[in-house]
Structure formats: structure tokens, C-alpha cells
Amino acid sequence: MKTKLFTLTIVLMTFYKVTAQKIYKTEEGHILMMTLVNNESVKAESHKLALYLDYGSKIINGVLDLTTISTDVSEINTILQNQETPLMLRFTGTIPSHDFLSKRHDPINFNWPVTVTYKGKYYKSQFNATITHLEHGIAMSCLISAKGQVLVSDTGLDSLIEGIDKTIEVQFTQLVLKLQ
């Protein structure tokens, strides 16, 4: 009887390990953007950045509906919120470190090439990114910070927002928990 109980325990533990979470996700990530509109500085942000990290491949996929952006200019808010369909901006990129969630490390700085998709068009961008190790007692996590520029002509926002500058500075930070 002890052998059967022991075997059942091993099978259940193995099953638990095999079916453990393989993708980290949040649908309430924070993103901050800065640009000029008619030579005036405009700050825009959203708390609806969805991020998905595949722990195995280290690929991050991000999705943002541009209609969820809030700016300090009411006219721009009205333009974005009155869109009939979502303005989905997607990006994907691979983190070039295989062990950033498995052990302590110094900050990892890297150039992060990402592919951005908007309205069926693809273009490449490069962000400067940092992964910082954080400890909370016995728990571990990492903070992924990235910033870069997006060309407005690639997004089509120049057709919606008159007088917008040629680039948008983008910055986001997301806490990623260690896979248990």
C-alpha cells in the first residue's frame, strides 16, 4: 500500500510540474508616451497594455488598443475615444537572456529589436531595455523596462491627429514574477 501511495504522489507531483504556468500575462500594464503636437509637448498613457511572456522562448508579445490612451489634451482624447473600431497596436520581441528569472543577476541592459504591427502593417523598431532582479524575501521577480521611438508614419496616427510630430517616445515597465 505504501508503494502505491508513493507512486501516486510522484505521478501527481510530475503532473503538477508539467502543467505549471508557462506564460506570464498582464492586461493592465502601464505605458507612457511623449510626443509633440503643434510644437507642444503631449504626454499620453494607458493602463491597458497587455503583455504576455512565454517563459520557455523568452518571447514577449504586447497589445495596446490606442483608444485606451489618455492624454493631457482633451481634443486628442476625443479623437481617440470616438474611433468606431479599436486601434490595435501589437509588438513582439525576444529577451536575449535565458536565465533572467532563474537566479540572481546584475541588471541586464540590451538593445531589444521588436516587430510592431498596426492595421496589418509590420515595421521594426529597437528599444533600449533593462532587466533588473528583485527579491522579496524568498520570492523572486524581475522588472523589465524598455524605451524607444516609434515613427508616427508607421502607426497612421498622423492621419488622426493633426500636427503630430514624426516620432513618439515610448516607455513601459513591467514586473514579471518568477515561474515556480
Image (cartoon, grey):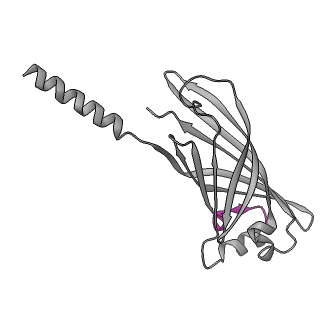
The percent position of residue 109, horizontal first and vertical second, equals 73, 34
Image point (74%, 62%), residue name: 71
Q: Position of residue 58 (x, y in %)?
A: 57, 42
At x 70% / y 28%, what residue is drawn? 107
Residue 13 seen from this side = yes
Residue 49 visible in this rendered orientation of the protein: no
| The quadrant where residue 134 appears | top right
Please report the bounds of the magenta region as a residue range.
65-73
**Image height check: is 73 above or below 1?**
below
Q: Position of residue 91 (x, y in %)?
A: 64, 56
Residue closer to the observer: 56 or 5: 56
| Whole-percent x, y for residue 154 in the image | 77, 67
Q: Nearer the viewer, residue 126 or 44?
A: 126
Q: Is residue 154 left or right of residue 93?
A: right
Q: Is residue 50 above or below residue 21?
A: below
The furthest residue to the right: 39
Q: In the displayed structure, would residue 9 be above or below residue 52?
A: above
> The C terminus is located in which quarter?
top left
Lateral position of residue 112 relative to residue 97, left or right: right
